[in-house]
Amino acid sequence: MRVLRKIYQFIVDKPLTKNTIIHERYVVVKLIGKGSYGIVYLCNDLQENERRILKQLRPSKRNKSEEVDLFQQEVNILSHLQHRNMPTLYDNFSEEGNYFFVMNHIEGYNLDKVIFTNKEKYSEKDSLLLFSKLLELIENLHSQGIYHLDLRLPNILLHHNEVFLIDFGLARMQSDVRAANKMILQDFYDLGDILLFLLYTTFSTTKKKALPWTEELSITKETTCLLKRLLSIDEPYSNITEICGDLTAALEAID
Ligand SMILES: Nc1ncnc2c1ncn2[C@@H]1O[C@H](COP(=O)(O)OP(=O)(O)OP(=O)(O)O)[C@@H](O)[C@H]1O
């Protein structure tokens, strides 16, 4: 049954081909990626003569109301974003039963490629500086009651030392304080995870047995304290101001 579903999805979710015109306006330039529920293309907006990103709900999901709702939820969240380092929503429409939205094209490289393919090395200070740029974006989101909930290396783009945040497919708006608290902790945890990945870029070992990060990484006690609270090993942070305080202390400890 699962094999049949996979074959069905493979056939139905065939990406649009180059030069296909959608909505009499967007010309597909190339396929960028196929995610779990979306297909992402680089396209040309004929009206504005600009490069844009076109995201399509996988056709195999278009008849499932929950999937369509999730897609519309991403559109709704994008419509609230107000930061130049996050996507701007330009258009949202359905055509021949398929759902699409359009956003600005952010130049840059996914952080996972930067780390694992380009093998970029981040010193402790560089890791903390990149982390601080990301934290500023999260502060902007949380101040609007938006929680990203999918902070991972592939969802961060780097361009000339600037950090951009993408993929709001799992993001939620939450005004209920109790529910929001869980989401805040999730974003903080994921931030800690990203910081660990950055710090590990300079790590090398000859030992066969992996040790806990607290033993493997040679970092200051201030950065360790920051990580332990982000990862809820020690008392978790309750707000971003607290994180900023510890981040400043960690940066000062290096200088
Ligand atoms: N605004 C944008 N500007 C530039 N590239 C983008 C933009 N949005 C998405 N991308 C590229 O498309 C890829 C897939 O986008 P996105 O993560 O939003 O799709 P997804 O369907 O949610 O994928 P997944 O299920 O893998 O998370 C991103 O990793 C990124 O490389």
Image: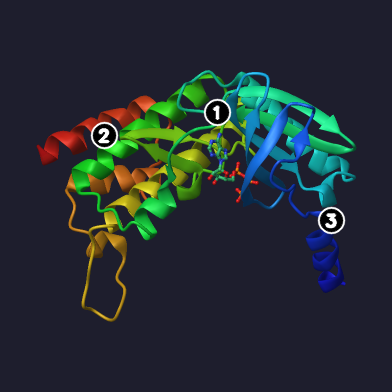
In-front residue for pair 178/109: 109
Among the 4 quarters of the image, the one containing residue 158? top left
* Residue at the image point whose x is 60% and y is 36% from the top: 168
Q: Is residue 228 above or below residue 182?
A: below
Label 1 vs label 2, nearer the camera: 1
In-front residue for pair 85/20: 20
Q: Is residue 232 visible?
A: no
Residue 23 percent across, percent down from the top left: 79, 28
Amino acid under disc 2: Asp
Ligand 1 is within 8 Å of the C-beta of the residue at disc 1: yes
Label 1 vs label 3, nearer the camera: 3
* Residue at the image point whose x is 65% and y is 51% from the top: 35
Mark 2 and mark 3 lie on one chain; the one further toward the N terminus is 3
According to the image, what is the colour scheme of the structure? rainbow
Numbered tag placed on residue 87 in the rendering: 1
Mark 1 and mark 3 lie on one chain; the one further toward the N terminus is 3
Quadrant where the C terminus lies?
A: top left
Numbered tag placed on residue 246 in the rendering: 2
Amino acid under disc 3: Val
Query: Between marks 1 and 3, how big is the CA–CA gap?
Result: 28 Å
Mark 1 and mark 2 lie on one chain; the one further toward the N terminus is 1
In-front residue for pair 154/42: 42
Read off the residue under disc 3: 12
Label 2 vs label 3, nearer the camera: 3
Q: Secondary structure at mark 3?
A: helix
